Image (cartoon, rainbow, N blue to C red):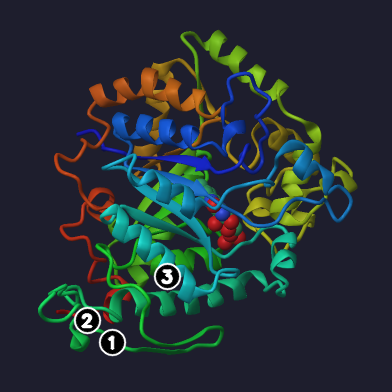
Amino acid sequence: MVKQMRLGLFENAQANDSGTATWRHPDNKRYLFDKLDYWRDTARMVEDAGFDFMFLADAWGWADVAGERPDVASAEGLDLPRLDPAIVLGALIPETSRLGLVATGSTLLEPPYAFARRMATLDILSGGRIGWNVVTTGTADTAVQGFGVPMVGHDERYLMADDFMQVVYKLWEQAWEEDALERDKNGRFADPAKVHRIEHEGPYFRSRGYGNTARSPQGTPVLFQAGASPAGRTFGGKHGEAIFVGSGPVEQLRALSASIRGEAVKNGRAADEVKIMAAISAVVGSTEEEAQRKYASVAAAQNPDVTIASYAWFTGLNLAAYDRDTPMTELKTELSQTQVARFAGKTVGDVLDDWHAHGVGARPFIGTPEQIADQMCKLVEGADLDGFLFSPVIPPASTADFIELVLPILKDRGAIAPHPAQPQTLRERLMGASSPALAESHTASGYRRKS
Ligand SMILES: Cc1cc2nc3c(=O)[nH]c(=O)nc-3n(C[C@H](O)[C@H](O)[C@H](O)COP(=O)(O)O)c2cc1C
């Protein structure tokens, strides 16, 4: 039997994705990312095509290449300017009815009490279609400068994130019982016996009192996570329900997914309770030659300054300051270690070439629709994945190509999970859960008050 894959769309409420600047390409429409039409059309397109969710990445800060080139960010629309992804998703709630809506939120920079309310509000208004990609913000120092807070070391950011999770779990799972609201005009609005004070005194965060929102359909939104470092995997194995991984060779991804599933098992969860989704891009042509021509037009639309700036934004490292022959193993960072470690065995020059071609993502699948469908099926089986996060090289044209040309082949092969017959919460749809609530085996369900 063919393994059925889950699909998400990787979007970004800015002109470019971090790492590529394709906004000048004639088919790019996301240079109009600040128009609601772009988001409405994109969300409806993927909802109708049967995608499980749309994900809006997010980040704070901007690339300034060791303080020397802050101009690249604004000149090329690289990480500046952007929109708040949670608000964009809120605007898409009435435009969609089944699509999961997933936003990134930072445990380093957002206060947990306010963040918990924002996510609960989205989950309430969408009928339980919300997911949160938990990030510790391992990118440019400019992020913390904007907030006026000190940067925290790589592994310590995950300890801080763990403390953040305790606060939001208490607010989402413990503070309000599911049936606390009575709305009885002749009686009371809510049953005070079902509304509980929370107490949290952690190493990083404190919170005391009542939750500001009642329980949302899912309680905790579906938890996504993407840290691939050892500390990131430990965190993901405990908290993540779905884990995003970058794409790469099948053996490398297989080892990564085995390690993530192993971390889940250490936390008393089943190995398949964590859904692993690899980010992929595709450039599709009716022939291989046409696909290669299309890909060449992507590279031609890119600016070499963006390559340097974007790598610096992820890692704080200015590759232009190193000799091209320098082995990557000589470089060290407290920002994203994954973006250094994944190039072990390569030189600075290799990374410059690679990053110029496709930024932080892996090289796209380039070829005919059948070739791309084959590669996806092979990867999902070979690397023990649960699906893909499709990242359009040229938004939205690459997404439309994928839907029109590749998706029908995958559907014919039975490789795509069917659309739900009835609207479901994101957790039921993505995790195959029988209830909108977190699995009993998840660390947060210990906080839940049962009505
Ligand atoms: C598919 C994918 C999506 C990601 N989305 C975001 C994002 O929206 N915001 C962010 O700050 N980091 C994002 N990341 C980065 C990770 O969350 C993580 O911070 C990064 O891998 C560095 O952590 P690590 O050193 O533990 O691997 C993403 C990573 C992947 C693979």
Image point (72%, 45%), residue name: 310
Q: Nearer the viewer, mark 2 or mark 3?
A: 3
Q: CA distance from mark 2 to mark 3?
A: 17 Å
Measured as percent of width and height from the top left, residue 318 is found at 83, 50
Measured as percent of width and height from the top left, residue 429 is found at 24, 48
Residue 116 badge: 3
Disc 1 + disc 2, Cβ < 8 Å: yes
> Does residue 337 lie above or below 360 as drawn?
below
Residue 196 badge: 1
Say which element carries label 1: loop
Q: CA distance from mark 1 to mark 2?
A: 9 Å
Residue at mark 2: 449
Q: CA distance from mark 3 to mark 1?
A: 16 Å
> Does residue 388 lie above or below 176 as drawn?
above
> Does residue 115 lie above or below 278 as drawn?
below
Of callouts 1 and 2, the N-terminal one = 1
> Does residue 222 lie above or below 97 as drawn?
below
